[in-house]
Structures are given as C-alpha cells and as structure tokens.
Image: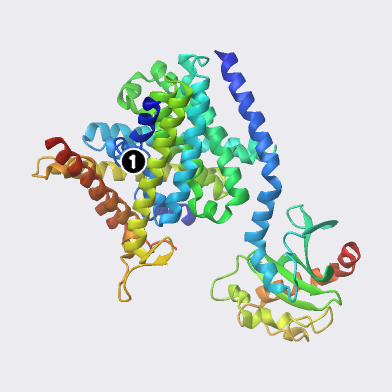
Amino acid sequence: MSEYLLLIVSAIFVNNIILARYLGNCPFLGTSNRMDTATGMAMAVVFVITLSSATTWIVQEYILKPFDLEYLQTIAFILVIASLVQLVEMFLQKSIPGLYRALGIFLPLITTNCAVLGVAVLSVESHMSFIKTLVFAFASSVGYGMALVILTGIRERSATSPIPQHLRGTPLGLITVALLALAFLGFAGMVK
Amino acid sequence: MVFVLTAICAGSALVLAYANKATKPAREYQLLKYVQGPSVKKVLKGYDNDPIRDVIEISIGKDEKGHSIKIFPAKKDGKIIGIAYSSSAQGYHGQIEVMVGIDMNGTITGISIMRHSETPGLGARVVEPAFTNQFAGLKLSGQLNLSTRGGKIDGVSGATFSSQGVVSAVRKALELFPKVKKEVS
Amino acid sequence: MGAVVREFTKGLWKEVPPFRLVLGLCPTLAVTTAAKNGVGMGLATTFVLVCSNLIISILRNAIPKKVRIAAFIVVIASFVVIVELMMQAYFYPLYKILGIFIPLIVVNCIILGRAEAFASKNSVLPSIADGLGMGLGFTMSLTLLGAIRELLGNGTVFGIHVMWESFRPFGIMLKPPGAFICLGLILSLMNWISSKQRSH
C-alpha cells in the first residue's frame, strides 16, 4: 500500500510530468490563459493519459514482447493513442454529450501532447505491473492538471498587471512556469 | 481510402523490418559495450583484443533469462589467455549478477558486481573493492568460501547473505569453467 | 529556384522554431542541458522532418483527406523508429542522454505541423527545402539554448571550460526552472527585436 502512496506522491510532486520532466509544454502554455479552458484541458488529459497508458501496457505485454517487435514500440504506441482518442471522441459524442462538449476541441488535440506518449513510454520502461501503471498514469496526469490550474490562476491575475510589451504572452508564461517549477523543485528529495 | 492507408502501413512495416535486421548486430554490440563492457574490462588483464567484439556465445548453459551464455575472451597475440562471463546467485534481496574473470588455469583474475538489489549501506557494500579484490588469485577450492566457513574471504560485516550470494555466484562460474574452457579452446 | 531558397531560409530566422514558430517546446527545454545534446537532438529531428516532408509531398495526391493525419503519423513514426535504431547502433551514449525524447520526436508539433501546412500542399523540392530550413533552424536554436544553459550551469560550452577560474556555476540553469526562464527571456528578446524591426 505504501509503495502506491509513494508512487502517487512522486508522480504528482517530485517528478511532476510538466514541471520536472518537461512533458506536455505546448498545450500547457496555450490553454493556461483562462480557467475554463484550463479545467477542460486538465480533465481531458487525465482521461486520455490514464486510458492510453492502460492500453499501451496491454499492447506492450501481449503483442510487442511475445512477437519480438519491441523496436516498433514508438509507432505502435502513437497509433494506439491516436485511434483511442478517435474512438473515445466518437463514443462520448454519442453517449455522454455533456462530457463531450465540456472537453471540446482538447480531445483531438491531445494526440500530439507529448505527455500522453511520454507517460506511456515511461511506465513501460519502468517495467511496472498493470495496476501500478494505472496508478502512475492517473497520478501523473493529475499532477499535470494541477500544475495547469495553478498556472492559469496566476496568469489570470497577472493579465491585469502592467507588463512590458515584449514580455507579454508566452515569455511571461514561461517565466511563471519557471517559478512554479522552482517551487516544486523543493519537493525533490522527499522521495528517494 | 483503406487501400492507401494499408499500402503506407505495409511499406512502413517492410522498411522498418529491414532497418531492424540491418542494425541488429551494431545495436547488440553497443548494448554489450556499455552495459557489460565496464565490468568485463575490470576483470580481465593483459589482453590486446576487444573482448566485447570477440564475444563467443556457447550453448552449454542458460542464464536466468534463458539466454545462452556470452563468453568475453581476453586474447594476447591471437591466443586466449583468459575469459569473462557472468553468473548469478541469490543474495539477500534477489539475484546478484557477478562478472567473473578467469585465466586459462582456472584462477580468478577479478570479479565485478554487475547488478544487485541489496540493502544500501549493508549488503550493497559487496560492490566495494575491499570485498571484491579478495577473490583474485583464488581457484575453485576450499579457500573460495567465506572465512566463517573456512575460506579466505572476509564477508561484509552485517551482510552475510549478500556476501554468501556473491561467493555462490563465483563458485557457480568456476564450476562451469572446465566445460566452458573446452568450448572456447 | 529563388522560391525554393526562400522556403529554406525562412526556417532559419523569420519562422525559426521554436523561437518564432512557437512549436516543439518539450524537447527544446528538456535536452538543452548541453550544447552537444542540442545539436544531436536537432539533427535527429531534422532527419525525420526532411524525410517525412519528402514522402508526404510525394504521396500528397494519393492520400485521401479523411485519413491524412493517420497517414502522416505512420510516415513520421516510421522515420522516428529508423532514427531510434540508428542511434542505438551508432550513437549509443547520445541515445542514452536524449532518452525518452527521441521517440517523442513523433509528436513534435513542428513535424506534423509542417506536414499539414506545407508538405501536403507543395511539390517535392520546396518541401525538402522547407524541412531542411526548419530543421536546421531548430538545430541552431537548440544549440544556442544548450550553449547558454551549459555555460551558465556548468561553465563549459561543448565540454570546453570557458568561464574564469572562480566562476561558480548556476546549477539551476540545468534544471527545469532554468530551462523555462532562459526560453522565456529569449522569446521576449525575439519579440523586442521584431518590434524594433517593425518600427523601422
């Protein structure tokens, strides 16, 4: 039990996938301007990462490994992720239209979010069991969503402050992320 | 629509299968060089070849993953003067993998711990030279045992199981030596 | 011919990724802990970019619109696997350093972006020029950022000690905060430069 707790704390705080592992930057800055876009993105990310990490684990264990096709990992994983997102989109549109509308355009956009492929590859590389992979993927994506929401809160506030012209937008966003990353760096060493 | 996609996938599959085959020897060499290489270099002495490139795979035994044993030969002027191969045995927390270097008379030239999951500060101290250096010069005899069992090797204090695991792995390697020697000579 | 050259040079300054064309941020931040790593990553990405632009441009009329993203992904991913295999075979230490970001080239928005925006709509030669220009521009940017972070964070550039004896390196430059700050400052510098250019 404690190793799961450790895994969760590590994935959210110590090795936060965006603030410590650099995964998922492009959409991170793009969707952190308004709180409603941020929360939509965060939900979509948690959903897709958890689901795709579970699926890619199965693909790795039962298709790639037995047939000695591990060198095809990258192409297999990205195709699985792309198809999964497509299927999920179609399913949500028909069955849970409320959720579909809430996630909006972020769902298809997530296919190219390096965090999705990144977490899938990371969990496979650590040779974790299926349950641990699920926990790791879920916790990592929650960490991402959390960082996103925090960043959006800060950026919304700073939008009304006087900022030099050339620092506006992405540059200031990056510097804010830097400060956030600095804060999270304080968690390093919490988990050996 | 389906046809085009299938054609692209098929083309991709062919190209990748070819690339995989073409690069396989080079990739295996690199993996050996960087993963096992440092240990191999540590345990062999006085050679003028590249033990990694001259690796010999023999079929008289299998390691715990079911792979055939890889022998890294040390040669001088074309003659094999020593060999190195890995062996493993149960430590305190799991298998300890040891690379053992042996000269053609069956005397150990050196050992190096490659992989273990022992306790840091206790069992993990078997990797220290103070422990591993004791093995050089010994043959498969009563001396190749922990001092608590009448041998010449002082175990790491507080880590009897780990020390014994290393000794067992080394003994296993030496027991296999006569057969190995026959295969590579 | 002039048009082809223009496609090439735009990737080197006017639309250089990631500083002007803000795409491909993940590898930019992650691997630029040293100038050498920036070069390695940039060249690997350039290889994939040029090859995929080439193939996609050749096949552009054969790929039906509905499945084009899937087709692009298969082509790009194949070249990424080729890069992976070649690096494992011939550049193993660099492969270990770049780690997870080599397979992540497949989701590098630059590559999919150029495939969608350019290669699928233009003939072969301009597409190659576009890929080459963007790729080399990307490589230069990564190398520059890598050099800055390596200089401030380690006192070296390409492994050579450049700073004076008593220089204490800013280790933070090699960590995520340093990466984000450096990139942010460079982007604001680019904004400042373009605003100066516009006012002339």
Q: Residue at x 73, y 80 (%)?
A: B135
Decide which of B173, C39 is in the foreground and name it. Answer: C39
- Quadrant (top left/top right/bottom left/bottom right) for the C terminus of chain A: bottom left
In the rendered image, which residue does mark 1 sit on? C18
Decide which of B9, B173 is in the foreground and name it. Answer: B9
Q: Residue at x 50, y 30 (%)?
A: C52
In the image as oriented, which residue stretches furthest toward the left? A162
Q: Is residue C93 above or below residue A172?
A: below
Q: Is residue B2 above or below residue B19?
A: above
Q: Secondary structure at mark 1?
A: loop
In the image as oriented, which residue stretches furthest toward the front? C1
Q: Residue at x 44, y 45 (%)?
A: C42
Residue type at numbered disc 1: Pro
Q: Residue at x 42, y 39 (%)?
A: C135
Residue C58 placement, left or right of B117: left
Decide which of B10, C135 is in the foreground and name it. Answer: C135
Where residue A71 sits, quadrant-wise, is top right
User: Where residue C197 sits in the image (x, y, percent)?
Assistant: 17, 38
For residue A187, say whether it is visible: no
User: Where residue A186 sits in the image (x, y, percent)?
Assistant: 31, 61
Q: Colour scheme in the image? A: rainbow
Where residue B29 sits, quadrant-wise, is bottom right
